[in-house]
Amino acid sequence: LEAAQVLGREVWPLVLDEHERDVVAGAFLGGPFPNRREHTWRTVDGRRRVILWSNTAVLDRRGGVRLVIATGVDVTAEREAQAARQESEARFRTLFEQSADGLVLIDPHDPDVPWRIVDCNEAFCRMNGYDTEDLIGASIDLLHPYPMMAQEGPDLLAWIREEQPVHGEGAHRHRDGTVFPIESASSLVTVGGRELVLGQDRDISERKRAEEQLRQLAAQMTFDAQHDALTGLPNRALL
């Protein structure tokens, strides 16, 4: 719209559908002033835009509204981005909770608690033997055999930032004191405007036991192939 199309005319029919006009007009004129209101307005080509209004008023001697001075800012893009971010975070939350792997969100920037646990799923708690409330707010070093993040955190964060996702094997200390092997993957995510580390951990104790059994079996088979079954002495294949 151009100024000539608006001046001297009632604004509501130009930008609002009929069923919206009384509500929005009441919000603009009802005070108290100053105030901030957010409404969806219609453009001349029929598109819907979200406008954030900052309003003040000139009052008459009786305190009635004589004139409203309104400054509007189009925040459509910001609201669409916000809605998309909320939808993305909702999907992330669903996947986070339903994952069979242990998932943990860690704040590597906390000045007081090295690599503070921000959130974790049920699988992560169960794997390590803790309840959620025991872990959230604690350092991830609670689960390490030594204070790894307190000592190596900055280098690890730089590695994740450069090569994410990063994969490796390590060890966790269960609540009962036993140390068990894990396979982990770490990457950076942004949640609620904060840069966090997403850790995906899997208990590989059974796999390690199976690998050790296979190693021992292979060693035994090699020994049997090279030694006499009765005397245990090396056979000709070994001589």
Image (cartoon, helix red, strand yellow):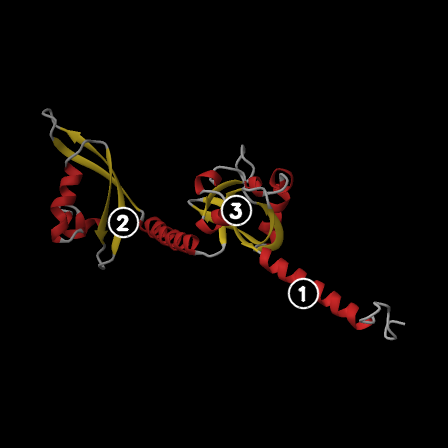
- Out of 190 and 82, give the one closest to the viewer: 190
In the image, residue 137 above or below residue 80: above
Q: Is residue 118 visible?
A: yes
Q: Secondary structure at mark 1?
A: helix
> Mark 1 = which residue?
214
The residues tagged by marks 1 and 3 sit, at their Cα atoms, a distance apart of 27 Å
Where residue 179 appears, as percent x and y from the top left, is: 61, 46
Residue furthest toward the left?
62
> Mark 3 = which residue?
128
- Out of 114 and 144, give the one closest to the viewer: 144
Residue furthest toward the bottom?
236
Q: Secondary structure at mark 2?
A: strand
Amino acid marked by disc 2: Val
Residue at the image position 36 percent from the left and 50 percent from the top: 86
Asked whether the beta carbons under mark 1 and mark 3 sit within 8 Å of each other, the answer is no
The residues tagged by marks 2 and 1 sit, at their Cα atoms, a distance apart of 65 Å
Q: Secondary structure at mark 3?
A: helix
Q: Which mark is residue 85?
A: none
Badge 1, how many Cα within 10 Å: few under 14, some, many 20+?
few
Amino acid marked by disc 3: Asn
> Mark 2 = which residue?
50
Where residue 8 appears, as percent x and y from the top left, is: 13, 45
Residue at the image position 18 percent from the left and 51 percent from the top: 15
Residue at the image position 54 percent from the left and 35 percent from the top: 113
Q: Earlier in the sequence, mark 2 or mark 1?
A: 2
Amino acid marked by disc 1: Leu
Rendered image quadrant of residue 208 = bottom right
- Say whether residue 211 is left or right of residue 129: right
Where residue 188 appears, as percent x and y from the top left, is: 52, 50
